Amino acid sequence: MSDGRVANPDGMTEKCGVVGVSLRDRDAARPLYYSLYALQHRGQESAGVITHDGFQQHTHVEMGLVGDAFDQDDVEGLNGSVGIGHVRYPTAGSVDSSCAQPFSVSFKSGSLGLSHNGNLVNADEIRDELANMGHAFTSDGDTEVIAHDLARNLLEEDLVRAVKRTMERIHGSYSLTIMHDDTVLGVRDPEGNRPLCIGELEDGYILASESAAIDTLDGELVRDVKPGELVVLHKDGTGFDTYQLFDREDTAHCFFEHVYFARPDSVIDEKLVYEVRRELGRQLWSESGVESDVVMPVPDSGRAFASGYAEAAQEEGEDLEFAEGLMKNRYVGRTFIMPTQDERERAVRLKLNPIKSTIEGKTVTIIDDSIVRGTTSTQLIQLLKDVGAEEVHVRIGAPQIIAPCYMGIDMATREELIASDRSTEEIREEIQADSLSYLSIDAVAEALESSRGDLCLGCVTGEYPYDIEGEETDRDVTRPEIDGASPLADD
């Protein structure tokens, strides 16, 4: 519970953010830099940009936040009107500069840069095959696997066919921005698990994980990249071409993008995230509303849920106050050191401070997006009772997380997930809440105006839309066979 964007033993960490631009008459570096700031919530471990000036590729990739990874000289040294960028939080591969992105490779047919949001489940198989064919890998990340496979295919195929051939081999979730020499393209996996959208700027076009990056550049959202679609931006920034390379009967959109990861001001799959969260809050009241004096969000992710919850209650005549009863310290980050259990418990007070007048002598309902391990939830409930709450009810705007995510969210293992082997009542007892309710899967699907079959629900059902070793699937799917085909020329 609580916001996973700070050091948090009970939260989740973001995936990654990708961006690509093609402009008519100005360098791409600064728009890419601003876009990465807009996507900073999706990754805080590294940031990078690759540009191309028509003759050569320019790269700057560093560990840390965007503001730490780039200075003025770095940005000014990235020449060229086309480029791609990336912010990363690792879900596959090490936490070091070898896995920082965009990943770049030079080969006989030119240069290649690649930014990846998502996670492949068959990367090891492809890496082993390519290594046996003479490819040398510098990292243990799956992004380098995609880059090498695409580079190999580009030796024999044109750009579109090479991308399709690579998509036929990789299995898992991915949204990619790619730069082949001075051409920028975007790819979304056939199930559409990770978000990717197209935007129009005053002097060009942009591909980005979220529309908030487009807004930052005063652009207009054109539409989402379709699942299985390849988008190729024109080099002169005048337009783009599209190729529908795969067309699945069902999608597998990650419902947690709307619940937690995306910025509330982003539009993903044609839905404003903030309004989806408010609707999830309304559904939460409908399913499990409880009489209390005040409802408050766990900042920041619970805010829209709590707003919708309170509004739905008030429409039914309930005298329920919406209040900000927990103030967040935004200066406690992932690097905060918590060596002992006592200090880890103290961290909750460092991150969240209660407003006593809002809580003392009242029955309180707190709303958040999830409970992962339960550690922070227990401490937070005790904190509220210590400052005088008579009762603390907990409502969660998502179903119980019972299984890990393999698609690009850094989530706890089954052994660490509090809901993997406990009932709601057992969890309530463990976190010492007066009541606890989660939102149903059907309510999530209704809020997203989607069928369950078009969502990735693996973390809340234990059944996945991809063929993952040792796990159940929720559809008829088989991972590609990687059979060590005849090697092509070395890259």
Image (cartoon, rainbow, N blue to C red):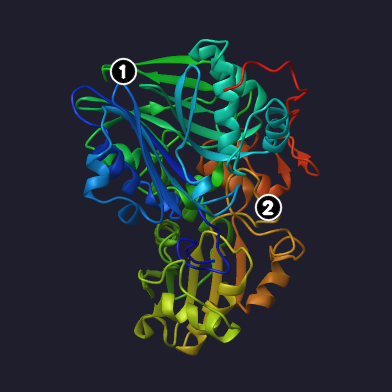
* x and y, in percent, of residue 168 in the image: 65, 21
The quadrant of the image that shows the N terminus is bottom right
Amino acid type, residue under disc 2 in the picture: Pro
Residue placed under numbered mark 2 in the picture:
404
Q: Position of residue 397 (x, y in %)?
A: 53, 57
Q: Secondary structure at mark 2?
A: loop
First in residue order: circle 1 vs circle 2: 1
Residue drawn 30% across and 17% down? 239
Amino acid type shown at disc 1: Lys
Q: Is residue 341 left or right of residue 205?
A: right
Q: Quadrant of residue 289?
A: bottom right
Q: Check the picture and name the quadrant holding the C terminus.
A: top right
The image quadrant that residue 410 belongs to is bottom right
User: For numbered disc 1, what is the local secondary structure?
Assistant: loop
Of tags 1 and 2, which is closer to the observer?
1
Nearer to me, 178 or 435: 178
Q: Residue at 45% across / 83% down in the picture?
A: 362
Along the viewing direction, whichever of 188 and 294 lies nearer the viewer: 188
Q: Which residue is mark 1?
A: 235
Q: Position of residue 78 (x, y in %)?
A: 28, 36
Residue at 55%, 69% in the rendered image: 394
* Rendered view: 170 above or below 183: below
Q: Is residue 379 visible?
A: yes
Give the quarter of the image for residue 488.
top right
Res 247 seen here? no
Quote the CA–CA distance across marks 1 and 2.
41 Å
Q: Position of residue 385 (x, y in %)?
A: 51, 86
Residue ID at (66%, 31%): 171
